[in-house]
Image (spheres, helix red, strand yellow):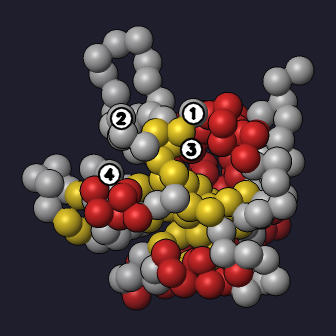
Amino acid sequence: MTDSSNVYLALIHHPVYNKNSEVIASAVSNLDLHDISRAAKTYGVQAFYIVTPLADQGELVERIVSHWTEGVGARYNPHRSEALRLIKVAVSLDAVRHEIAGNGQEEPVTVVTDARPHPRNISYDALADMLKSERPYLILFGTGWGLTREFIDKADYVLAPIMGHTGYNHLSVRSAAAIILDRLLGDTD
């Protein structure tokens, strides 16, 4: 098992594609917040960033998180509260990088996830070995119909896609995040 004290997640809502391959800023999904934060807490991730340039979407995330961490939801379900406390809102990937580096750490290594193969794919085993270092790692997930090619090309690494044994490959980001976290940080004993 890899120590996850240096692992951060970010769910990117811009720049992503829509089904017509147009670059958009996608809407935040309540299910993504709950499910990915719970997986992140389970595997010891340090923070889960929701990255959106849209002020109304950032405010929505803050209201949802507040309900579950300070409001009635915190009393109703303390376990959920614990997971949602990992969520932070940022307007850009640069803002996330600066916040992580501002905690006295190095600039994080960025690892993009994508459902499509990429010439620079890195294996899960190789990344799990890299995560054993002290350096912070920021694993980036896309929304909509995936991160733009330009965004992907700027990342330090591109994680190999999750592939089933059928021709169908359209997992929800929540499912993909859980599978990836287990492959990288799960207890294999």
Residue farthest top in this picture: 165
Looking at the image, tell me whether mark 3 or mark 1 is earlier in sequence order: 1
Q: Quadrant of the C terminus?
A: top right
* Residue 171 sits above or below residue 89 on the image: above
| Horizontal and vertical percent position of residue 59 | 49, 84
Secondary structure under badge 1? Answer: loop
Secondary structure under badge 3? Answer: helix
Q: Residue at x 75, y 40 (%)?
A: 129
Q: Tell us which disc is closer to us: 2 or 4.
A: 2
- Judge the density around disc 4: few (<14), some (14-19), many (≥20) Cα neighbours within 10 Å: many
Q: CA distance from mark 2 to mark 1?
A: 11 Å
- Amino acid type assigned to the residue bearing label 2 in the image: Pro
Query: Circle 4 is placed at which residue position?
Result: 146
Which quadrant of the figure has residue 107? bottom right
Secondary structure under badge 2? Answer: loop
Query: Circle 3 is placed at which residue position?
Result: 177
| Horizontal and vertical percent position of residue 43 | 78, 46
Query: Circle 1 is placed at which residue position?
Result: 123
Looking at the image, tell me whether mark 3 or mark 2 is earlier in sequence order: 2
Looking at the image, tell me whether mark 4 or mark 1 is earlier in sequence order: 1
Q: Residue at x 36, y 58 (%)?
A: 153
